[in-house]
């Protein structure tokens, strides 16, 4: 559990730095927690990273746990909610689904230490004891699943996948696949190797037999 920290009187009068906006701070805090995790992120380190006086940080966000929850909600609102519009932006849907999945693999391949997904990382680090974080993670997963559901519904209407596809079940599978990828890429030396699995999944959705890769 996080301890609520009292703000010393000497800190309470410190003004916010010029240019301070909560959105900017939440974005930077989200990136910091994403890279370092919750337990390893001290308020002292966060204060330094965010460029804030301690009094400003405590006055605005109260404590580390509150800041973390706000950062996690920021991820939900600025990143997760973009999935549905991306998939429904027009044109073929399956290539857009592939792009979403492959982008995570490419990000992991280009990171010295793959960060995975902040929501998945939170599951491993904070759940089930952190009920507030659990609620936000559940909302994130629901948004991902609904995004894939809407995308697959559009794909069925376009004839990209069979009309009788169980889009609810397939959306759950894609959501689970995406979250699972975020775990595997943290251990996989060559994240791009998982592209074959993504393509096999999408070919199955399209009603096509997977193509066995040619032997080296």
Image (cartoon, grey):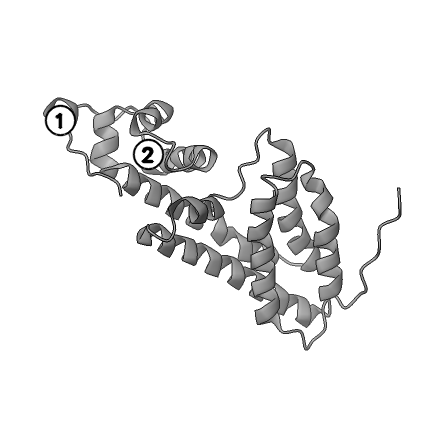
Q: Position of residue 173 (x, y in %)?
A: 60, 62
Which label number is shown at residue 142?
Answer: none
Which residue is at a point 66% across and 46% down the rendered structure image? 102
Kindly identify which residue carries mark 1: 8
Q: Nearer the viewer, mark 2 or mark 1?
A: 1
Q: CA distance from mark 2 to mark 1?
A: 23 Å
From this viewpoint, is residue 44 visible? yes
Which label number is shown at residue 21?
Answer: 2
Question: Dot 2, how many residues are within 10 Å of its Cα: few (below 14), some (14-19), or many (20+)?
Answer: few
- Which residue is at the front of the view, 95 or 124? 124
- Is 50 placed left or right of 216 in the picture? left
- Is 51 placed left or right of 35 in the picture? left
Which mark sits nearer the N-terminus, 2 or 1?
A: 1
Q: In the rendered view, tell whether residue 91 sits above or below residue 158.
A: above
Q: Looking at this rendering, what residue extends furthest in the left direction?
A: 9
- Is 52 placed left or right of 197 in the picture? left
Q: Secondary structure at mark 2?
A: loop
The image quadrant that residue 63 belongs to is: top left
Report the quarter where the C terminus lies. Answer: top right
């Amino acid at each position: 559990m996080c301890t609520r920290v009292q703000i010393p009187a000497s800190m309470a009068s410190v003004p916010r730095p010029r240019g301070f906006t909560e959105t900017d701070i939440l974005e930077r805090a989200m990136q910091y927690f994403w890279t370092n995790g919750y337990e390893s992120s001290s308020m002292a380190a966060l204060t330094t990273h965010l460029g804030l006086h301690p009094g400003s940080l405590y006055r605005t966000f109260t404590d580390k746990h509150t800041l973390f929850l706000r950062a996690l909600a920021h991820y939900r609102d600025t990143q997760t909610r973009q999935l549905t519009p991306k998939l429904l932006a027009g044109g073929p849907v399956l290539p857009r689904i592939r792009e979403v999945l492959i982008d995570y693999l490419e990000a992991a391949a280009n990171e010295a230490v793959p960060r995975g997904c902040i929501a998945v990382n939170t599951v491993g680090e904070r759940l089930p004891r952190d009920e507030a974080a659990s609620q936000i993670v559940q909302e994130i997963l629901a948004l991902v699943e609904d995004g894939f559901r809407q995308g697959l519904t559009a794909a069925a209407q376009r004839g990209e996948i069979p009309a009788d596809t169980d889009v609810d079940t397939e959306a759950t599978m894609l959501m689970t696949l995406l979250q699972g990828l975020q775990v595997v890429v943290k251990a996989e030396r060559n994240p791009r190797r998982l592209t074959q699995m993504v393509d096999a999944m999408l070919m199955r959705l399209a009603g096509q037999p997977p193509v066995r890769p040619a032997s080296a």
